[in-house]
Amino acid sequence: QSMSLSVTSAQMSSWRRQIFEQLSERTKREMDNFKHYEQAIEQAVWVKKGSM
Amino acid sequence: MADDKDVLRDVWFGRIPTCFTLNPDEITEREAEPYYLLLPRVSYLTLVTDKVKKHFLKVMKTEDVEEMWFEYEGTPLKWHYPIGVLFDLHASNTVLPWNITVQFRNFPDRDLLHCQSNSIVEAHFMSSIKEADALKHKSQVINDMQKKDHKQLWMGLQNDKFDQFWAMNRKLMEYSTEEGGFRYIPFRIYQTLSDRPFIQKLFRPVSPEGNAYTLSDLLKEMFPAALPTEREPKRYQVLIHGIEPLLETPLQWLSEHLSHPDNFLHICIVPAPSD
């Protein structure tokens, strides 16, 4: 119940819209020119260790 | 149309392009090339730098290698802070990639905690989650989970598995409708020019009258100098995951959507660029 539902543009509060916009600007700024860089974590298949 | 759940993805998949360079004082057998990597903002330096270590060890003799540590412009980087926090605090407003120096000697014991294995990071991460749940739910949610559930949170972070992590983390984000939020908001406020590591106090998401507190209310109480005034130009930037949320943003929403995987809302207060 804590997750908000999707809202239309008209309903969206300015603070929420501003967060969405800034996050996509952040992606452009920090990632768009660096897509050729290697990822630090390889996307390996998740293996659950049975040590517990 | 954007959905609040997209925010969780954007936060999780944030990356900092980084250039690692070996400290020139290290003894090497041949010149060490820099190493370039995309670092997850929500992870920890020592957890995601195996490749960096392997790269530099190729040019070094075993006897010249002690514990690896990192420095940015003379500041040792605390591995137990999330990577995004280190970047926002020390290097926001600089040109990318982020230039980090790698060192294998002269470990600065006064500034950094030792971290010889991933199990140290795991212990730190889990203790933060437990502390956050003590604040949010009097530890009820984390204590109701099984050991395998705790492991799922950790493995989700370690292996960069968003769905695996959030399948469990969503339980830590629940609260009753009557209460309108968590008991207290787990937050930490960092500042660059301070001997204090961070500010952390009890703060509720909702006033006794039932009104939602905002980022502005939190700062008013914890760090009023960070709030802009009409009389002078902006002195500080208030950064969360590299963005500046509006001060009217409800704190409960921020805690649910912009907390790090350790369940704390990490807020960096840095001097505003003077351009």
Image (cartoon, coloured by chain):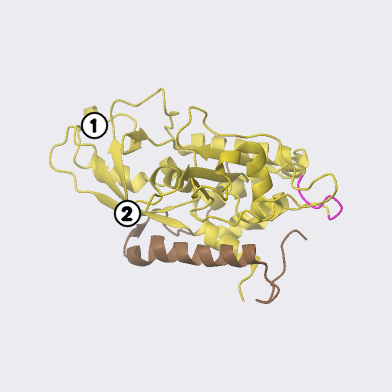
Chain colours: A brown, B yellow
Q: Main secondary structure of the magenta part?
A: loop
- Locate residue B27 relative to residue B99 in the image: left or right: left
User: Badge 2 is on which residue?
Assistant: B95
Q: Which residues are magenta?
A: B177-182
Where is residue B198? Give x, y as percent. 55, 34
Residue furthest to the left in view is: B30
Disc 1 from disc 2: Cα separation: 34 Å
Q: Nearer the viewer, residue A1 or B239?
A: B239
Q: Is residue B80 magenta?
A: no
Q: In the image, which is nearer the foreground, mark 1 or mark 2?
A: 2
Q: In which quadrant of the rendered view does residue B54 lie?
A: top left
Where is residue B172? Give x, y as percent. 70, 49
Q: Is residue B181 magenta?
A: yes
User: Badge 1 is on which residue?
Assistant: B62
Q: How many marks?
A: 2
Task: Inspect the image, locate mark 1, and give the three-letter code of the amino acid beneath it.
Answer: Thr
Residue furthest to the front in view is: B231
